[in-house]
Image (cartoon, helix red, strand yellow):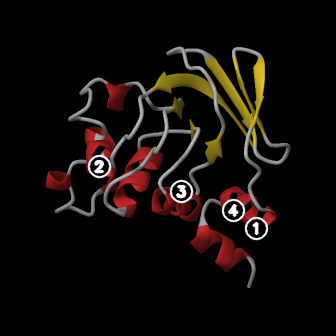
Amino acid sequence: MQGVGPAVCLGNDIDTDVIIAGRYLRTKDRSVWAKHVFEDLDPSLAGRIRGAIIVAGRNMGCGSSREQAVVALREAGVIGVVAPSFARIFFRNAVNVGLPVIEAEVACIDGARVVFDLDSGWVEVDGERHPARPLSEKMVAILRAGGLVPYWRSSR
């Protein structure tokens, strides 16, 4: 499974409350979440992440275990998230909803071309290849299916 897109760079410790603020969770309308993603961090980010790959620092997705944060990123058009480390629940929520997460140590420049290959376990930033922590075959299959529910449905 591969992905390609421009980098949107974020720092360390990006909290799920920063990804989607609690005030928007009174609705189940995912388009509202997508519209307001990262609003409290940088209001311009929601308009820049469609078709992009987020390259974050350590501890991406820390904070509350809200699945809506990952869903908001996916609904906003994020192709994948690269970071040296993820909060455990965020990582698993991402796989469950079909948002590729790649653990790798990379330098980030906004707009750089990012390419990842989950099957081979690498990520490139502007042509410079870095190893990524391999995902299990099952996790790659879940991501390829579009998330855990589609994976279960296809395996019946």
Q: CA distance from mark 2 to mark 1?
A: 29 Å
For residue 153, above or below residue 23 = below
Q: Secondary structure at mark 2?
A: helix
Mark 3 highlights which residue?
A: 91
Disc 1 residue crowd, few under 14, some 14–19, many 20+, Cα 10 Å: few
Which of marks 1 and 4 precedes in the sequence?
1
Q: Given the image, on which type of amino acid does mark 1 rest? A: Lys
Left/right placement of residue 140 relative to residue 24 reads right
Picture quarter with the C terminus: bottom right
Residue at image point 28% right, 58% down: 29
Instruction: Decide which of 54, 14 is in the foreground and name it.
Output: 14
| Amino acid found under the numbered disc labelled 4 | Ala
What element does badge 3 sit on?
helix
Q: Earlier in the sequence, mark 2 or mark 3?
A: 2
Q: CA distance from mark 2 to mark 3?
A: 19 Å
Mark 2 vs mark 3, foreground winner is 3
Q: Residue furthest right?
A: 120
**On the rendered structure, is 107 left or right of 129?**
left
The residue at which mark 2 appears reads as: 33
Q: Which of the two discs, 2 and 1, labels the residue nearer the N terminus?
A: 2
Say which residue appears at 20% left-offset and 35% top-offset: 40
Using the numbered discs, state the Cα–Cα distance from disc 1 to disc 3 in whole angstroms: 14 Å
- Which secondary structure, mark 1? helix
SS label for mark 4 = helix
Where residue 122 sits in the image (x, y, percent)? 78, 36
Left or right of 116: which side holds 41?
left
Type of amino acid under label 3: Phe
The residue to which callout 4 is attached is 145
Name the residue tied to disc 1: 138
